[in-house]
Amino acid sequence: MADPARARKLAVRIRQIVSAAIESQIKDPRLGMVTVTDARVTSDLREATVFYTVYGDATAVADSAKALASATGVLRSTVGRQTGIKFVPTLTFVADHVPDTARELDEALERVRHADAELARLREHATYAGEADPYRHPEEDDETSDADVSTSPEHRSAS
């Protein structure tokens, strides 16, 4: 098992190398606007997973996945040359769905903001269906009832 800090450093370096290599070395016409978002390396430094996003529709994503799969060997050899490690990890490319999920969450939050604004607009001119204060309050009389007088301490000491 390798040091976890070493695995993290290697993952960052792989992300940088793969990103630069995709931009400069890979000339596949199927490759769309690919952004490398993250890389993770297993603790034994044998396998690396590279996460990426593609700007475009589903066909652009599928074409870019095929282009990355065909360029895996070139990218792995580039990683090996630039890192200088004894065993170069195998590269696996995985489409990153986090930006899509974040966009969906932003859209849902925007819908909720509009619904809250509409509710606040409707609430401005609303009135209570019954009384404004529906709770019972004891009547504030200065007079006390006979039951209260008989149980009060002054009354018991007087008798």
Image (spheres, grey):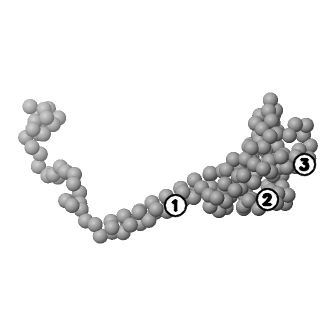
- In the picture of the structure, the residue carrying the numbered disc 3 is 82
Percent x, y for residue 133?
23, 57
| Dot 1 or dot 3, earlier in sequence | 3
Helix, strand or loop at mark 1: helix
User: Is disc 3 surrounded by few (<14), some (14 to 19) or many (20+) residues within 10 Å?
Assistant: few
Residue that carries the numbered disc 1 in the rendered image: 107
Residue at 85% x, 58% y: name it.
25
In the figure, is residue 124 to the left or right of 136? Answer: right
Residue hosting label 2: 28
Closest to the observer, 93 or 133: 93
Among the 4 quarters of the image, the one containing residue 23: bottom right
Task: Find the distance from the CA under tag 2 to the CA under tag 1.
Answer: 34 Å
User: Going from the N terminus, do you reach mark 2 or mark 3 first?
Assistant: 2
Q: Residue at x 11, y 49 (%)?
A: 143
Q: Position of residue 142 (x, y in %)?
A: 14, 51
105 above or below 6?
A: below
- Local packing at callout 1 (Cα closer than 10 Å; few below 14, some 14-19, many 20+) is few
Cβ–Cβ under 8 Å for marks 2 and 1: no
| Position of the N terminus by quadrant | top right
Type of residue at label 2? Asp
The answer to whether residue 20 shows anywhere in this view is: no
